[in-house]
Image (spheres, rainbow, N blue to C red):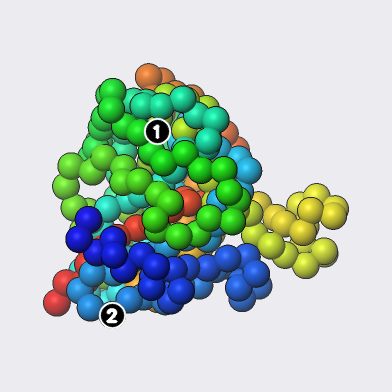
C-alpha cells in the first residue's frame, strides 16, 4: 500500500491507547488530504471466528472505504478461509439472516493475517488487509453493517473493552465494561465504528448462530472523502 510509509507518523497523530482515552471511547484524529485512516484502540485477550460491526459516516460528503485490516490471535493456525460481507443500515438484527448480506470479499486458501500477541498493539503496521473486492461507498451520515467470518475460533482479534470507573464495571475489580450493541467504539469526526455481536460459528456455517456478547472491530479502516 503506497501510504504505508506514513504508519509511524500516523501512530503518533491518530493511534490511541486506553491510557489516552477521554473516558468514554478512544478518539482519533483524521489525517489531512484525500487518503484517510482510522486506527482503532488496542486489542484485548478475546478472539473469535468473526465479528459483526457497523461503519457510520459522520462526514457531509461521500466516504469510500478502500481497505479493512485486522489480525489473528497468535495461537491461530493459518492460512485460513475468510470472507467479508456488508449490509446497508447496520448489522443489528440481521445476524442470522443470510439474505440481508452481500459478500464483498473471500479467500478460501491463502488468507494469512498477521498473528499478534501484544495486547498494547494499536499501530497500523500490525494488521493485514481483509479481502475486499470493491470499495464501499457511504453517503453522508449513512451506516453500513459489516461481517467478517473465518474458519478458526481465534481467527479475528477483538477490540479491548472500555476502561471505566469502578461504579460502571461489568465485573468488580476489572476496571472495564462491555460495549452495547451499536455503541461507538472508535471515531475521528469523519467515521465511527460501532460494536456488534461476536460470530459464534465458522465460515462454513455463516449466519446460523451468533453470540450475545458485543465487541468492537480491532484494526485499521482506510478511506477517502469525495467532493
* Residue beneath the point at 31% across and 42% down: 130
Query: Would you say 62 lies left or right of 44 here?
Result: left
Q: Which residue, given by chain and number where applicable, does mark 1 sit on?
A: 149
- In this view, 71 is above or below 90: above
Q: Quadrant of the rendered structure where residue 17 is?
A: bottom right
How far across and how far down the image is residue 157, in percent?
51, 42
Give the structural element (helix, strand or loop) at label 2: loop
Residue lying farthest to the bottom in this orientation: 32
Which corner quadrant holds the C terminus? bottom left
Say which of 90 and 186 sits in front: 186
- In this view, 39 is above or below 219: below
Which corner quadrant holds the N terminus? bottom left
Say which of 114 and 21 sits in front: 114
Residue lying farthest to the right in this orientation: 172
Alpha-carbon span between mark 2 and mark 1 = 32 Å
Q: Which residue, given by chain and number where applicable, does mark 2 sit on?
A: 32
Closer to us: mark 2 or mark 1?
Answer: 2
* Residue beneath the point at 25% across and 58% down: 65
Circle 2 crowding by C-alpha within 10 Å: few under 14, some 14–19, many from 20? few
How far across and how far down the image is residue 159, in percent?
54, 51
Say which of 132 and 205 sits in front: 132
Give the structural element (helix, strand or loop) at label 1: strand
Say which of 154 and 23 sits in front: 154
Residue 198 seen in the figure: no
Circle 1 crowding by C-alpha within 10 Å: few under 14, some 14–19, many from 20? many
How far across and how far down the image is residue 200, in percent?
52, 29
Which of pointers 2 and 1 lies earlier in the amino acid sequence? 2
* Residue beneath the point at 18% across and 42% down: 133
Residue 14: image tag: none
Amino acid at each position: 500500500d503506497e501510504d504505508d510509509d506514513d504508519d509511524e507518523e500516523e501512530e503518533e497523530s491518530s493511534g490511541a491507547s486506553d491510557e489516552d482515552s477521554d473516558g468514554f471511547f478512544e478518539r482519533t484524529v483524521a489525517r489531512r488530504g484525500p487518503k484517510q485512516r482510522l486506527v482503532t484502540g488496542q486489542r484485548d485477550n478475546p478472539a473469535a471466528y468473526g465479528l459483526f460491526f457497523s461503519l457510520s459516516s459522520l462526514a457531509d460528503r461521500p466516504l469510500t472505504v478502500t481497505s479493512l485490516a485486522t489480525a489473528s490471535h497468535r495461537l491461530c493456525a493459518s492460512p485460513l478461509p475468510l470472507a467479508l460481507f456488508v449490509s446497508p443500515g447496520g448489522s443489528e438484527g440481521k445476524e442470522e439472516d443470510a439474505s440481508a448480506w452481500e459478500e464483498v470479499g473471500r479467500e478460501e486458501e491463502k488468507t494469512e493475517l498477521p498473528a499478534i500477541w501484544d495486547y498494547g498493539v494499536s499501530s497500523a503496521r500490525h494488521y493485514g488487509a481483509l479481502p475486499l473486492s470493491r470499495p464501499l461507498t457511504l453517503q453522508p451520515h449513512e451506516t453500513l453493517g459489516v461481517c467478517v467470518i473465518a474458519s478458526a475460533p481465534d481467527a479475528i482479534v477483538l477490540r479491548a473493552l472500555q476502561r471505566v470507573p469502578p461504579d460502571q464495571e461489568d465485573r468488580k475489580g476489572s476496571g472495564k465494561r462491555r460495549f452495547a450493541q451499536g455503541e461507538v467504539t472508535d471515531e475521528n469526526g469523519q467515521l465511527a465504528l460501532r460494536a456488534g455481536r461476536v460470530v459464534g460459528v465458522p465460515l462454513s456455517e455463516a449466519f446460523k448462530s451468533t453470540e450475545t456478547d458485543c465487541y468492537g472491530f480491532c484494526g485499521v479502516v482506510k478511506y477517502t472523502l469525495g467532493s
